[in-house]
Structures are given as structure tokens and as C-alpha cells.
Image (cartoon, rainbow, N blue to C red):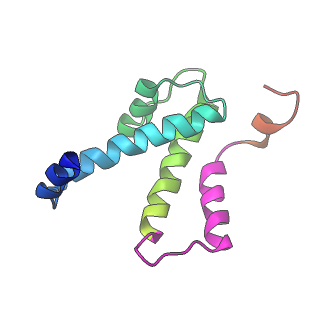
Amino acid sequence: MQKKTLVDKGKPLQGSALQRIKEDITAKWTYNSNGIEGNTLSLRETKMVLEEGVTVNGKSKEHFEVYNHKKAIDYLQTLVNADYKMPGGDNLSLHGFVMRSIEDEFFRPGKK
């Protein structure tokens, strides 16, 4: 309870602090989510793609996964408010953001 009290005293967060927290959460969320799907980028490489637009040599699929995941997070943040309930259409839109620019060949059985 002491930690929550300390956090509450610091509210509202300043713009730059809030932005840094958002960037850190986005990087970790993207890294962990993509890792579950088999993405081989490290957290550092994921941050480089997000922050600097770097493409890691030989990992174009992974680059698109990182970039697309961030786009989906950005879109989700435009939707969410205290009264938001996700309809099926928004779920499909999020999936579309994640899959954009990733060629079908990456997902065909037997292809690597």
C-alpha cells in the first residue's frame, strides 16, 4: 500500500515521464508478444526497430512483426477509454494491423 500511495502522490505524471513509460511498455509488450510467436529479435533489437527504425539483417519478417505490433498498440490506444467495450470489428482491425506487410510465404506450412 505504501508504493501505491507514493505513486498517487506523483500524479499526474509529466508528459516526458509518461511518454518514456509508454515507450518502455510498448517495447516490452511487443518483444514478449512477438517472442511467443517465435520472433527471434532480442529486446534490444526490438527497441532499435521501434525507436530508430533499424532493420536487423536477415530478419525482415521479425522487423515487420515488431513494426506492425506497435501500429496495433497505437490503434488500440486511440480506441480505449473508461467506457470502451471491444466489438468484433475492432478485434479484426487489430489483427489486420499485426498482419500487414507480412507475406503469406512466411506462414505457409513447410516454408521458412
Residue at x 60% of width, y 21% of height: 58
Q: Is residue 34 above or below residue 12?
A: above
Q: Residue furthest left?
A: 9
Q: Is residue 23 above or below residue 62?
A: below
Quarter holding the C terminus is top right
Q: Residue furthest bottom?
A: 83
Please report the bounds of the magenta region as a residue range.
Answer: 79-102
Of residues 12 and 45, the one nearer the viewer is: 12
Label total for image: 0
Residue 47: quadrant of the picture: top left
Report x, y in % for residue 38. Answer: 66, 29
Please tell me whether residue 92 belongs to the stretch shown in magenta. yes
Of residues 75 and 1, the one nearer the viewer is: 1
Residue at x 42% of width, y 36% of height: 53
Q: Residue furthest right?
A: 110
Q: Is residue 94 left or right of residue 52?
A: right
Residue at x 14% of width, y 50% of height: 6
Please tell me whether residue 83 belongs to the stretch shown in magenta. yes
Residue at x 16% of width, y 61% of height: 12
